[in-house]
Image: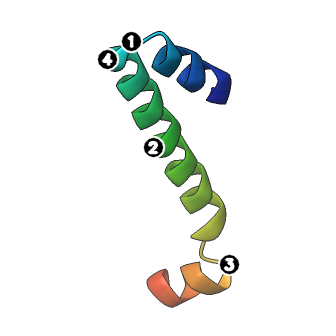
Amino acid sequence: MAPRVWLTARAHQVARHRATVRGLVTGALLIAGFFTLPPFRLLGGWLFG
């Protein structure tokens, strides 16, 4: 996705660039949360335990 972000920015496709960056950041946060917050992990135990 990073090359697509760069290409859309260089082509001045603002709407497509904005949507791609939002999707990339949202996906990254969801994946990081999925691996960080399960109950058997330290932080997940603190939050949900």
Tell us which disc is closer to us: 3 or 1.
1
Q: Residue at image x 63%, y 26%?
A: 1
Circle on res. 40: 3
* Mark 1 neighbour density, 10 Å: few (under 14) some (14–19) many (20 or more): few
Percent x, y for residue 28? Answer: 56, 47
Q: CA distance from mark 3 to mark 2?
A: 24 Å
Q: CA distance from mark 3 to mark 4?
A: 40 Å
Q: Quadrant of residue 23?
A: top left
* Mark 4 neighbour density, 10 Å: few (under 14) some (14–19) many (20 or more): few
Sequence order check, earlier mark of 3 and 2: 2
Query: Would you name the residue on which mark 2 appears?
Result: 26
Sequence order check, earlier mark of 3 and 1: 1
Is residue 18 toward the left or the right of residue 7 in the image? left
Q: Residue at image x 66%, y 23%?
A: 3
Query: Would you name the residue on which mark 1 appears?
Result: 13
Sequence order check, earlier mark of 2 and 4: 4
Q: CA distance from mark 3 to mark 1?
A: 43 Å
* Proximity of marks 3 and 4: CB atoms separated by less than 8 Å: no
Amino acid at the residue labelled 2: Thr
Query: Would you name the residue on which mark 4 appears?
Result: 15
Percent x, y for residue 20? Answer: 46, 25
Q: CA distance from mark 2 to mark 4?
A: 16 Å
Q: Relative to 25, is 37 above or below?
A: below
